[in-house]
Image (cartoon, rainbow, N blue to C red):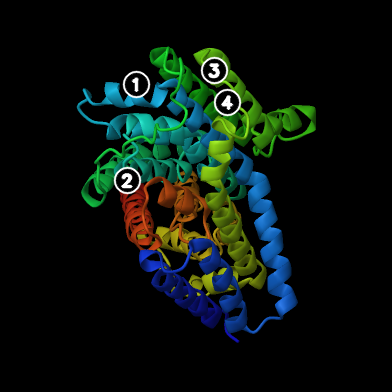
Amino acid sequence: MSYLIYAAILVAVVALFALITARGRVHPFLALVLAAFAFNYGVGWSLSFVVKSFGTGFGQTLAALGVVVVTGALLAEIADGTGATARLQQMARSWRTRSGPLALLGLIGGMCSTPAAAFAVLNPLRRGIGGDSPRSALTLGLALSASHGLLIPAPTVLASLTILRADWGLALAVGLPVALLAVLFGALFARISASGAPNPLDTAAGMVGTSLHAPRRGALALLVVSLVLVAMLIVQALGDIASEPFGGGNDRHFILALGNPVLLLVVGVGALLLLSWSWEKGGLSEAGWAGRALAKVAPLLLILGAAGGLSKVAQDVGMAEMTAEYLIPLAPVSGALVLVLPFALAAVIKTLQGSSLVAAITSAGMMMELAAPLGLGDPMGRVLAALAVSAGAMTVPQINDGLFWLVTRAGQFSPPAALARLSGGVLVQGGLILACLIALRAATA
């Protein structure tokens, strides 16, 4: 069976998923499990294949992202209990705009090892600054996506630049202004397409006794801790640099360990408790902050695991890479429009199998021998090709992507609404980035 048919089957499965989850008729976790089995049935692979691949993807996703999501949930509960969230919301009411600070956070957070992990640790701060509104979730998600596709040291950018042997300094000079433009566009898109009405805090549990005695200190503590965790994830991304001093040995292992999910949990929760110096009796017990956080986040963890399982099934089938290869003969042979090819290769692979890093590495590998024949062999051409690959590798998140589900749940979108707002927003944002890169190529060729 042609791999194009495999891709068409996955698209049909996603459409069916949106249909059965509309208005909550089927829980997303169950729908994702059904989607994996429906896709496997469509491509005709064995039952043992889908069971093994789904289980592997489920476990890998929870190991890499699950603990980070729990960390964010615990920070949010503590921030609510200490009054930090309410204090931030009160302060933000007097600001001219809340989207600007959230877009800036996303621009910085996009340089983390993964945008999903960055969203998880920034979500407690977003709830305060953005009033926990759908618009704030979409603004942060779009900003993270744009930044992760254009700025060093995001792993997608590092991989593309390294494989295509592009100049990092030139990539920074080109990527930063394009990222700023894309982030601003994302904030505008979120303003148009999502509600900015604040979501009232559920403070029935946890605000007892003297738990609200230091909301200002708690708000400052939440800001500091969030930025520290983002910094740890950015430093971890530096470990992906394939050269010394970070490319090997003990230094690299230490840097990678800084972004370990368990370390983020210990540092984040411990630092927030110490800096806010506000304790709920039994706060870390099953009846306190910890119990409430785990109860709230459990459904999301199951959904993330199932999304990872579906992504792994699609990756193991191998359809994404084979489908992307059909695009190569269709590429223009010269001119600035050749940049459509690296972008499209990465976008097809990302959309079909879910992993941005896999999409960037695979697409950059395809472009490695094509860059010179297509007229992209000069320094600027290689940089633009690498950035087109990494930007395409963020386009578009859908039901097999962790960031998609974090934004969906934070913004309280239904899955079909998230496909329209987040996936559609990233697609338009990616088109804007590609247009900028083409314009730069036309101006400098």
Which residue sits at x=55%, y=56%? 303
Q: Is residue 86 left or right of residue 27?
A: left
Q: Is residue 225 left or right of residue 237?
A: left
The CA span between labels 2 and 1 is 20 Å
Give the camera-side residue of 265 and 298.
298
Specify whether residue 95 is in view: yes
Residue linked to disc 2: 134
The mark that comes first in sequence, 2 or 1, is 1
Return the disc, 1 or 3, that comes first in the chain's sequence: 1
Q: Amino acid at mark 1?
A: Arg
Which mark is first along the chain, 2 or 3?
Answer: 2
Question: Could you say which disc has been placed on residue 283 in the image?
Answer: 4
SS label for mark 4: loop
Disc 3 target residue:
279
Q: Quadrant of residue 318?
A: bottom right
Circle 1: element type = helix
Q: Which residue is mark 1?
A: 87
Q: Amino acid at mark 2?
A: Pro
Q: CA distance from mark 3 to mark 2?
A: 30 Å
- Most extreme residue toward the bottom, as rendered? 1
Residue found 65% across the figure and 45% down from its top: 64
